[in-house]
Each structure stands twice: as C-alpha cells, then as structure tokens.
Image (cartoon, helix red, strand yellow):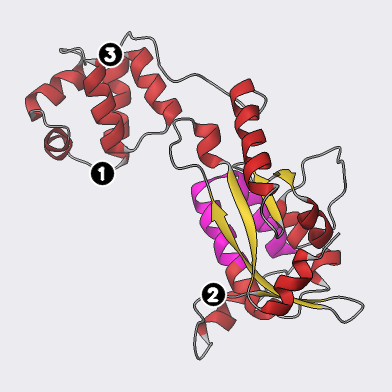
Amino acid sequence: MNSFGHILSAERKSRGVSQHRLATDVQTTQRHLSFLETGRSKPSREMIIRLSETMQLSHNQRGELFEAAGFTSPYSQRNLDSKSIRKTIELMEKYVLANWPYPGLILDPEMNILSFNQSAKSLFMLPNTSDAPMNVYDVLLSNGFMERVQNWEELSWAVYLRLRRQAQKHPQFRQKLESYEAAGLFDDAIKRLAHSSEVPPFIPIMMEFEDGTRLQFTSIEAGLSTVHDDILSGITIELVLPINEESDKLMRNQP
C-alpha cells in the first residue's frame, strides 16, 4: 500500500464510509477505488479534488493527498503572520469592524482576539496592548465582566454548551473547559437547562453598570464564505447585536 493509498484508506475508514459508497459519491468504481488504496492505480488531480470534497478534508489534508500522490500541492502552508492572512484580516478591520456601529471582534481558530473596534474595547474592557493573546472566553468569564452580568444562571447554559461543542471538535478547548468547570463557573448549568419550563430561542447577555446603565445584547458569528485556507476558515468575526432601543442608543454613543 503506497502513501497516498494509506492516507486515503485511513480517511475513508475514519468516517465509517465503505469503498462502494465513496466510489459512488466520486463517480468511479469500487474496483478503481480499491486500486487507489492499494497503490495499483495512481490518482489524477481531478480525482484527488473529488475525494477531498466528498470526504470534506481540511485544506492541509488535501495538500497531503496531492503530495502523497506525487503532485505539487496547490494549497500553501500559511500561519497568522503570513502576508495574505494579515491582508485579509486588515480587510475585515477596514470594511467590517470600522463600519459596524456596535462592538466587534476578530477571533482566531482558538478564540483568541486578533482585533477589535473601539466600541468592543469599551464594552469588554480590553487593553490597548497585551503581551499574551487575549482569549474571548477569558474576557467573558473574568470577574470584571461577570460581576456586571445579571442573568448568568441562564447565560451559563449557552456559554457552557458552546464551549463544550468546541471542545469536542478541537482539543485545545478541552483544557480550558476543564479549568472553568474546576472553578465552578458552570455548576448546575445542565441541570438548570434540563429543569427549565421553556428553553428560549436565544439567551441575551443582560448587563448592569455601576451608574445604573443597562445593556441587553447577543452576537452574530460570521466568517468568509469563499475560503480555501485552514487558517482563514477558522477566523471568525463576532459582532454584538443590541436587542432593544436603549441598548442600541447606548452602544452607538460609546466613546
């Protein structure tokens, strides 16, 4: 079994897909797919793309398939400091954050804050500079922020379930979830959800400040729709959305 065939077989089996099913989905025969996995046949570039799309491989995994088959991968290896990635983030800053009238954040795949607008700086009490990456969960679950949240019992459901979903997909969130659980931040969150008489369609964040000012808001999570890069596919924009007129006015008038 060659390198390409080994990778293909492993990816197929990890998804619980039979040779017959995958062959049908990529419009080939089971015999040809078997030959690809055992190394008796060499894939074309078009077949690699069909296999990658059907199995929903990451762009890095697609690059590995191209290289294992003896082709030059069309997928470049990038990181957050790559010129093209930085340029894309700058576009988000210029055309989204700068024009969004409410708080907005750009987050990396690990939910670290890459950029924010002035309104977000005020609401989330963000410093101008930081020696270490600021994680959005650490900001939301900080004492300074949480002491202003008036509905933590209800909000904890949403935060806990979102973080748990991310921990199931991405190992880097498991340690963070465990540390929050150990600190008791999510005590009885599931129990409260299970015994709720009615689960609302969404749970807003309700805050009250020292001067009596009250805000109610939720957020919209967005990303680029035409992405062909693993780093960019994990970068999201979190846009705060007020849910009443008072919050709208207050957020628009933030310094």
First in sequence, mark 2 or 1: give its number. Answer: 1
Magenta span contains residue 147: no
Viewer-side residue, 98 vs 126: 98
Other-residue count near label 1 (Cα within 10 Å), few / some / many at <14 / 14–19 / ≥20: few
**Residue 249 quadrant:** bottom right
Q: Look at the picture and state if 15 lies above or below 86.
A: below
**Kind of residue at disc 2:** Phe
Question: Left of 172 or right of it: where is 102?
Answer: right
Residue 4 pos. (x, y %): 30, 18
Residue 16's tag is: 1
**Kind of residue at disc 1:** Gly
Tell me the SS state at disc 3: loop
**Residue 91 quadrant:** top right
Q: CA distance from mark 1 to mark 3?
A: 21 Å
Residue at the location (42% across, 33% down)? 58
Residue at the location (24% across, 29% down)? 50
First in sequence, mark 3 or 2: give its number. Answer: 3
Q: Residue furthest right?
A: 211
Viewer-side residue, 85 vs 34: 85
Q: CA distance from mark 2 to mark 1?
A: 34 Å
Tag 3 residue? 2
**Residue 2 quadrant:** top left
The region drawn magenta spans: 159-183
Q: Nearer the viewer, mark 2 or mark 1?
A: 2
Q: CA distance from mark 3 to mark 2?
A: 50 Å
Residue 202's tag is: 2
Residue 255 pos. (x, y %): 86, 59
Other-residue count near label 3 (Cα within 10 Å), few / some / many at <14 / 14–19 / ≥20: some
Question: Left of 205 or right of it: where is 144?
Answer: right
User: What type of secondary structure mainly makes up the magenta span?
Assistant: helix
Q: Look at the picture and state if 67 lies above or below 212.
A: above
Magenta span contains residue 172: yes
